[in-house]
Image: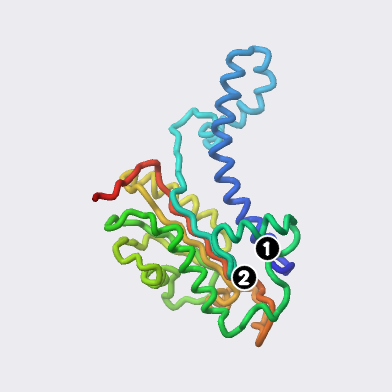
Amino acid sequence: MMHEKPGLGNDIRNGVLAITALVGLAFGGHWLWKVRSAVAKDPAAKASAQVTTAAAATPHGRMLAGEVERYVLEVRGLGLAVDRYYQEDTWRLFKDKDDNYLSVLSKDPKDYDPNTRIGDGEMAASAAFGYAAKAAVERWPLPVIVLGPPTTINDGSTMASGIAYWRQSQSLGLTLFLWQDDANVASAQGTLERLFQFFDDHPDVPEVLLVSNDSEGGRYGWKSPGLPKQSEGVHVPIMPAASTLIRNTNGCEVVQAT
């Protein structure tokens, strides 16, 4: 999806792998449970299951094998924006290109107006926020976790400052967004672990909104380490404006009163 800049392809693949890992965790538990049942019925299969049994001795293995309490997070809302493409338009780009090694975005500098680059990024973030959050129950507290690119700034600025702007731009005045956590990080792994831990610590909270925003303009604004000198004038961005929001639930359902 990026423009063949060193290291950026890895960042995207890592992000996709993180999401894939979460999906794999859910389906893997079901698969291992079926394997255990088959082994119990067929003594001859026990020898071939020794490797699986050894792996299940670890905490994560025991969870996948169904030997501990099961934890499920459901996705009730999803917002996705990449450059000027939102939701299903983004998936259509991937489908039409059908190549994991080529960018789905234009490589023509004339397609990127430097005068609207920051505004386009804000529009993308706001649109994704709306897609994911509009179905949330009104007048019900919704904790929000916001992720942004790494930063070298230490002036008290936080990614959470965008919550009020996104809320207003999408006319979500009746939704009670609560800042829960924010971070400027290179990897979302730690935040995903804290998301699960948050639900463990607060089982009475039905939903959490996870926000991730990144862009060339944002990285220069946050003074992210490792960036080349900022280009002037018309050019293909180092990375497009990208926003992903996932509204997660712990399986509980809150019904809007009528």
Q: Is residue 67 left or right of residue 17?
A: left
Instruction: Name which residue type carries label 2.
Output: Pro
The vertical placement of 102 against 26, above or below, is: below
| Residue 16 x %, y % | 62, 54
Instruction: Name which residue type carries label 1.
Output: Met
Q: Residues within 10 Å of mark 2 (few under 14, many from 20)?
A: many
* CB within 8 Å, label 1 to label 2: yes
Front-most of residues 144 and 95: 95
- Toward the left, the furthest residue is 258
Q: Residue at x 75, y 62 (%)?
A: 102
- Toward the bottom, the furthest residue is 233
Q: How many marks?
A: 2
- Name the residue tied to disc 1: 1
Q: Is residue 65 left or right of residue 106?
A: left
- Name the residue tied to disc 2: 240
The vertical placement of 46 against 205, above or below, is: above
